[in-house]
């Protein structure tokens, strides 16, 4: 059998397997792992590239290694979480015969503990990102369910004022409580702008170039 015929046979077998409904739950877990890995790499690589070249010192090789490591960690963690979450969801549904809202919560709790429970920079960023989103979502849900009244005016300006007021107060007087990447960003914006020597580090560079 020619190599092309063998490939066609293999491709037909795989595509036929993918159409089997009895394997759908297991295959969805596998594709979830794939999507988690791809999405994690797509969103982390550009972020790591920008933040590393803006704020990290070291050689080009060290910077590229840091970018690759951050991208790999984010991609791996997200892939493992999706795999764990979808797998536990499918298992609970199979055991109880139907999907329940508790399945999502419990599966995600276990996945979060196992995958995102380690306290490192990548996990901290992801967890804090999600925290801000769920606070917004729970506020909207509380209004929808009638637990809190519908605001008569848009509360967003007050929200923005409090967020910026608190974060700058923390930065100026308790900076150690903030995440290192946020400290670096705020140092660049608010403290580095207090120092210059001539036009070169006033407009062109942030700090004078070392000779």
Image (tube, rainbow, N blue to C red):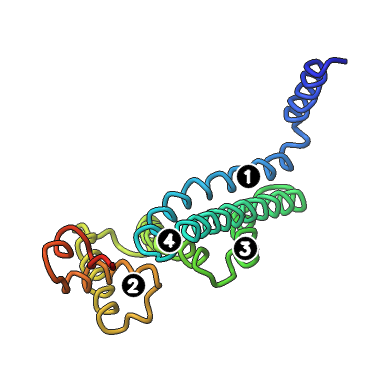
Alpha carbon of mark 4 to alpha carbon of mark 3: how far? 16 Å
Left or right of 70 in this view: 135 = left
174 or 109, nearer to the observer? 174
Mark 1 residue crowding within 10 angstroms, few (<14) / some (14–19) / many (20+): many
Residue positioned 35% across, 68% down in the render: 182
Which marked residue is nearer to the observer: mark 4 or mark 2? 2
Per the image, label 1 sits on a secondary structure element best described as helix
Residue at mark 2: 183
Q: Where residue 167 appears, x then y in whole percent?
A: 28, 73
Residue at mark 1: 32
Residue positioned 76% across, 48% down in the render: 94
Q: Which mark is residue 115?
A: 3
As displayed, is residue 153 above or below residue 37? Answer: below
* Quadrant of the image containing the N terminus: top right
Residue at mark 4: 129
Pointer 1 and pointer 2: residues touching (CB < 8 Å)? no
**Mark found first going from the N terminus, 2 or 3:** 3
Pointer 2 and pointer 3: residues touching (CB < 8 Å)? no
Alpha carbon of mark 1 to alpha carbon of mark 3: how far? 15 Å
Mark 3 residue crowding within 10 angstroms, few (<14) / some (14–19) / many (20+): some
């Amino acid at each position: 059998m020619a190599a092309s015929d063998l490939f066609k046979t293999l491709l037909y077998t795989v595509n036929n397997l993918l159409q089997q409904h009895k394997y759908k739950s297991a295959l969805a877990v596998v594709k979830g792992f794939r999507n988690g890995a791809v999405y994690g790499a797509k969103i982390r690589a550009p972020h790591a590239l920008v933040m590393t070249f803006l704020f990290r010192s070291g050689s080009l090789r060290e910077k590229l290694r840091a970018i690759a490591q951050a991208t790999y960690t984010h991609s791996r963690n997200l892939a493992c979480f999706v795999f764990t979450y979808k797998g536990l969801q499918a298992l609970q549904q199979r055991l109880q015969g139907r999907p329940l809202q508790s399945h999502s919560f419990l599966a995600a709790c276990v996945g979060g503990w196992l995958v995102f429970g380690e306290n490192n920079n990548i996990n901290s960023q992801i967890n804090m990102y999600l925290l801000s989103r769920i606070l917004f979502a729970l506020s909207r849900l509380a209004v929808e369910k009638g637990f809190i009244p519908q605001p008569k005016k848009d509360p967003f300006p007050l929200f923005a004022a409090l967020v910026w007021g608190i974060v700058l107060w923390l930065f100026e007087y308790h900076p150690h409580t903030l995440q290192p990447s946020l400290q670096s960003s705020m140092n660049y914006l608010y403290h580095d702008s207090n120092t210059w020597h001539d036009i070169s580090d006033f407009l062109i560079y942030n700090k004078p170039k070392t000779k």
